[in-house]
Amino acid sequence: MAAEQPPKYRLVREVGRGSYGVVYEAAVSETGLRVAVKRMRCSVPETVELALQEFWALRSVQSRHRNVIRLEECLLQSGPGAGTLQPVSRRHHRETGGHLQLVETCLKGRRAPAGAGSCFLWFVMEYCDGGNLNDYLLSRAPDCRLHRSCMQQLGSALAFLHRHHIVHRDLKPDNVLVSQGPAGPELKVADFGLSKVCQGNVNQHRFSSACGSDFYMAPEVYEGRYTAKADIFSLGILFWAMIEMITFRDADSQKELLGVYICQGKNLLSVGEALLENPNFELQIPLKNKKSMPSEVCSLIIDMLALNSKERLDASQLEIRIEQLSYGEKRQRSGA
């Protein structure tokens, strides 16, 4: 009998847990290189769909962007007991159809084949040692240079995703990871479970399923008629919350989270809902201190949060606007 092969990855510790999966710090057994492993149980249609959306979004990005999380590989774990790990790829799907058959079985509500046991998808990704952007920002004093860097990186990442026909649909600080580098923090847009890969121009593709995180959702998402410009609105809320350090306490976890909201008595209303209820509602930007936000940044955020999505910037325009920000600094002339 052949000797049993050692596992390719060694799970070191759990670093995060959500409704649909668990994220671990792991190490490549042969080299010791650190990676992150997100393991999602594919036992019900909801988790199968989320796992597949994340897989197709990350695999559809042919070239890599430094501010989008890098997928090293995706593995299918199935079978009785611990099961075996098999690489998942487009070619594997086309040639064998095995994984797609399993997915179809789950989605149609039929029982999995006898002896199949549990089924998991493992997303092996680059490891980010700085945690998520929410925790990273709240553990530091406000810093305009850091804010500008975050805006540039996230604006560039979103323009890249939209050019590659990917709409994220759940942009928020918890879904942005931080990797510490010699030149400062490097942000990585992550968690593509709600994303969609579109055909053609993302700004013309219409979505109908409302999804995302309440305080970051655009007004039109609540109505179930929206395009990729909903991502621009979410990023505008992120920028606003980051610069003014506006937070709320999550009712379930009691964790402090960045996010802008509107107070109506004792109730907290998302900016998107407030604009939807009252189209004439004027956002007070900045909310706390005029000195905390240069007028050009304030103007940019107002344009990102336009009620009418047609009046909102698209991702390419946003990237250019962010690059043009002086953030209160005088620009040097070329050749000076």
Image (cartoon, rainbow, N blue to C red):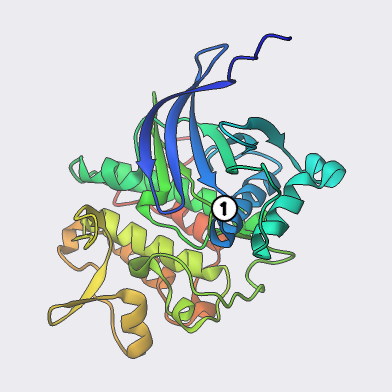
Instruction: In the rendered view, tell whether residue 264 sits above or below residue 166.
Output: below
- Left or right of 86: which side holds 193? left
Q: Which of 102 and 268 is in front in this view?
A: 102
Label 1 residue SS: loop
Count of numbered tags? 1
Q: Quadrant of the C terminus?
A: top left
Q: Which of 70 and 255 is in front in this view?
A: 255
- Left or right of 142: which side holds 224? right
> What x and y, as percent, mark residue 51?
58, 51
Residue found at x 42% / y 50%: 175
- Residue found at the far right of this picture: 95
| Residue type pointed to by label 1 | Ser
- Residue found at the far front of this picture: 114
Residue found at x 52% / y 49%: 156
- Left or right of 149: which side holds 41? right
How packed is label 1: few (under 14 Cα within 10 Å), some, or many (20 or more)?
many
Instruction: In the rendered view, tell whether residue 154 sits above or below residue 213.
Output: above
Residue found at x 65% / y 56%: 163
Q: Disc 1 marks which residue?
A: 43
